[in-house]
């Protein structure tokens, strides 16, 4: 949101600025409407939630949340957290040196390497599902959270490398030269010189990886069972073909979205910096 | 699928043991979770959610067996079950299958026969299970492969007060022509109230569940006994035209998207006066907080050429052949499908939530009859008159009332239902929809004909 203010200030065109600002609000509200609707519905009773036309002023209740927590969501939330945090950490640890080798000190044929990274995303995820399932089954790795951690790390790595590369190529060559003149080793340069400059970039990459792995459903649904089940799989369990479920699902969705929202707010400052940093070319 | 050799088996077990003991907290591999626990994969219908909440304090307390549940929506659970069972992954010991899957899975040896367990467990009382249920869960070898958790047939539900206000009485055994007549009379009886709700949502288990029962009683069938497709036959066409016309003229708003849940909401909210669907809906209609409680009458599934036309469906428990904990798995099934469990639900959660429709004794239980009196007798009658082996006017090549019990049917039924749903939406004629359906059905039938010829 601070980015929006900067933009308006930067343009200094009163009429146009107001119009743009108004438009931004309208678009913003349009995007947030379904979420607000979900929030409101989560506080309605099942009967009110199923009414058509909808009853906005229906009495509020915590029943949806109660029945959600009664079903014991904690193990699946913990699994999601484990898978998301660990895979994000691995992605950053691996992507950061890779991005360095593709931007600041590019390896030979670095464009080919970048394209190769991207090409791994071109295969539809579902096409890899069956081989992975059969592999996991034969090595006894089904229903194991480490399988998801490995998969999420490898799924997000190409995107992270691409994003981090664009951030790293913004790093001024001068400070790298200064570091090398001072005799800093490669590891030292990465840790003490490059990393602080691109912190906003790392934050936004980490957030995106966290969101992607937190929300991943397809692999989690097929490869997990009773032990390693993640929150999105648990969430789908509320959609029943017999009986009412809207309020419960909305309450569950709100709870499951909270960690991502919190992470987003926590990283907001860095994120806006990071997004605008990447955009300036 | 049997293991390839003894050595592989031994190594596999060794790996398994080390995986289970070594990776505690990681979630082990196949069959994880400790010796005294079982894994259960089940559909998330309200009856199962109740079971999930009652298990720890009752079953686990009595037996010391911990039960880990995975609960998924119907379509997802079907996908996951077929993936799990066809590969015999052994992750789950017990799963909810229906009487559609059980004979097919039994034939493929993906599920374990239960007859030995039943014989050793007289308290379970297999003879108390309603006959058509046991019959539809038996394999070709005569052994029982599944135990019902709750069963249903179909019947006609109607608003007694609305029919009365129009001076109409519902016969106890209505014909479809009488029902169409009544639908016309009660249509618009109240503002925004339509005559009848019938499923129009595509899906072999949605639209084609009620529609196939109409086809059966109109004298139609999907296939003849010698595997000739009959989808564009005069009887199948007449039944489909009747159904489509009825729902288009006097049916619910948004019919092409309406499935079980939408119709249930429509009847509860007074948007329709009648509904032909599953007997298990009655529990929701007569629940203490239902606005239509006490206002609903129940009549047998409407007929034309046959004596009865209700379907038969049961969510049931089966044990995966690859499970290493079959004894514990049976203990769980024996508890979940028992009389005591019904008693427990009745006392703890209310008698309208009992997973009924499977045991004769349920319908002699005064506590159940007190709460479910309005629909208990019609439900039991509907299930008992259902004949899965001979549901129509001609012999069939496979068991099944609202489905044909072959692995190809879900695909076939769903594809044809999309065109029939289009016909309900007015985008296609019934003749065109069934002409296309006939091609698809003949494709399936051809495979069986050529197999029979060999």
Image (spheres, rainbow, N blue to C red):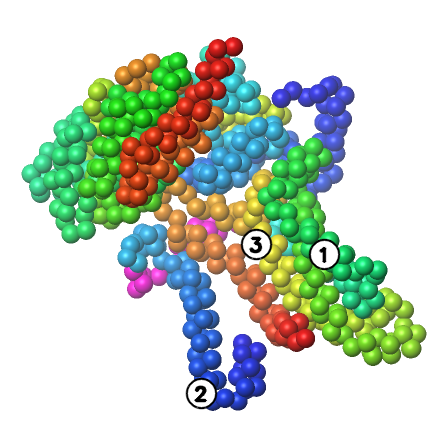
Chain for mark 1? A
Residue holding disc 1: A115
Spatial CA span between label 1 and label 3: 26 Å
Spatial CA span between label 2 and label 3: 41 Å
Spatial CA span between label 2 and label 1: 44 Å
Q: Can residue B44 be seen in this view?
A: yes
Q: Quadrant of the N terminus of chain B?
A: top right
Quick one: label 2, few (<14), some, or many (20+) residues within 10 Å?
Answer: few
Q: What element carries label 3?
A: helix
Residue holding disc 2: A15
Mark 2–mark 1 contact, CB under 8 Å? no
Pick whichever of labels 1 and 3 is earlier in the sequence. Answer: 1
Q: Give the range drawn in magenta.
A: A55-73
Quick one: label 3, few (<14), some, or many (20+) residues within 10 Å?
Answer: some
Residue shown at 10%/33% (left/top)? Answer: B169
Question: Are labels 2 and 1 on one chain?
Answer: yes
x%, y% of residue A256? 52, 56
Rendered view: A12 above or below A75:
below
Mark 1–mark 3 contact, CB under 8 Å? no
Residue shown at 69%/69% (left/top)? Answer: A201
Chain for mark 3? A
Q: Is mark 1 on a helix, strand or loop?
A: helix
Toward the viewer: B226 or A265? Answer: B226
Toward the viewer: B381 or B80? Answer: B80
Chain for mark 2? A
């Amino acid at each position: 949101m601070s980015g929006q203010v900067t933009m308006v200030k930067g343009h200094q065109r009163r009429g146009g600025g107001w119009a743009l600002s108004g438009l931004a609000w309208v678009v913003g509200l349009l995007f947030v409407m379904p979420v607000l609707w979900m929030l409101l519905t989560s506080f309605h009773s099942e009967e009110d939630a199923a009414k058509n036309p909808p009853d906005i002023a229906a009495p509020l209740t915590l029943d949806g949340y109660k029945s959600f927590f009664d079903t014991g969501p904690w193990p699946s939330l913990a699994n999601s957290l484990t898978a998301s945090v660990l895979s994000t950490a691995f992605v950053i640890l691996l992507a950061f040196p890779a991005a360095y080798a593709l931007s600041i000190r590019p390896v030979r044929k670095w464009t080919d390497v970048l394209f190769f990274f991207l090409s791994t995303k071109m295969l539809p995820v579902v096409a890899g599902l069956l081989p992975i399932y059969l592999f996991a089954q034969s090595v006894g790795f089904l229903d194991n959270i480490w399988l998801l951690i490995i998969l999420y790390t490898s799924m997000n790595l190409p995107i992270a490398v691409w994003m981090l590369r664009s951030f790293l190529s913004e790093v001024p060559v001068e400070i790298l030269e200064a570091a090398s003149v001072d005799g800093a080793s490669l590891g030292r340069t990465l840790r003490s010189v490059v990393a602080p400059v691109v912190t906003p970039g790392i934050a936004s990459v980490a957030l995106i990886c966290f969101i992607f792995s937190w929300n991943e459903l397809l692999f989690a649904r097929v490869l997990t069972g009773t032990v390693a089940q993640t929150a999105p799989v648990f969430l789908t369990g509320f959609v029943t073909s017999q009986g009412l479920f809207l309020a419960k699902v909305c309450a569950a969705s709100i709870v499951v979205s909270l960690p991502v929202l919190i992470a987003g707010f926590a990283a907001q400052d860095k994120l806006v910096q990071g997004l605008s940093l990447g955009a300036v070319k | 699928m049997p293991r390839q050799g003894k050595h592989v088996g031994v190594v596999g077990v060794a790996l398994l043991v080390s995986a289970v003991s070594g990776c505690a907290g990681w979630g082990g591999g196949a069959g994880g979770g400790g010796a005294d626990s079982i894994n259960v994969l089940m559909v998330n219908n309200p009856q199962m959610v109740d079971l999930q909440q009652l298990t720890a304090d009752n079953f686990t307390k009595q037996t010391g067996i911990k039960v880990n549940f995975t609960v998924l929506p119907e379509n997802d659970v079907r996908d996951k079950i077929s993936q799990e069972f066809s590969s015999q992954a052994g992750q789950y010991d017990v799963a909810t299958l229906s009487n559609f899957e059980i004979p097919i899975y039994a034939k493929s040896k993906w599920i374990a026969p239960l007859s030995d367990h039943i014989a050793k467990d007289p308290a379970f009382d297999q003879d108390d299970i309603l006959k058509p249920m046991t019959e539809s869960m038996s394999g070709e070898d005569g052994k029982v492969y599944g135990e019902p958790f709750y069963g249903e047939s179909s019947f006609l539900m109607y608003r007694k007060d609305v029919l009365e206000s129009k001076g109409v009485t519902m016969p106890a055994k209505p014909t479809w022509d009488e029902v169409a007549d009544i639908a016309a009379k009660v249509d618009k009886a109240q503002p925004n109230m339509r005559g009848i709700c019938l499923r129009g949502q595509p899906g072999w288990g949605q639209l084609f569940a009620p529609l196939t029962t109409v086809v059966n009683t109109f004298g139609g069938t999907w296939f003849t006994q010698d595997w000739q497709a009959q989808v564009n036959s005069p009887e199948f066409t007449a039944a489909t035209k009747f159904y489509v016309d009825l729902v288009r003229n006097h049916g619910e708003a948004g019919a092409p998207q309406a499935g079980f849940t939408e119709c249930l909401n429509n009847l509860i909210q007074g948007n329709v006066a009648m509904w032909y669907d599953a007997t298990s809906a009655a529990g929701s209609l007569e629940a203490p907080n239902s606005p239509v409680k006490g206002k609903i009458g129940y009549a047998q599934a409407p007929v034309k050429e046959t004596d009865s036309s209700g379907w038969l469906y049961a969510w049931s428990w089966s044990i995966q052949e690859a499970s290493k904990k079959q004894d514990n798995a049976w203990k769980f099934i024996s508890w979940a499908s028992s009389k005591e469990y019904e008693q427990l639900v009745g006392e703890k959660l209310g008698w309208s939530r009992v997973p009924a429709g499977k045991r004769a004794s349920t319908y002699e239980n005064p506590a159940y009859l007190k709460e479910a009196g309005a629909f208990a007798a019609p439900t039991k009658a509907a299930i008992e008159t259902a004949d899965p082996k001979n549901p129509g006017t001609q012999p069939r090549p496979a068991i099944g009332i609202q489905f044909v019990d072959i692995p190809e049917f879900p695909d076939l039924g769903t594809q044809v239902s999309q065109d029939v749903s289009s016909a309900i939406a007015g985008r296609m004629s019934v003749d065109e929809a069934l002409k296309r359906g006939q091609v698809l059905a003949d494709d399936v039938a051809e495979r069986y004909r050529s197999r029979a010829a060999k």
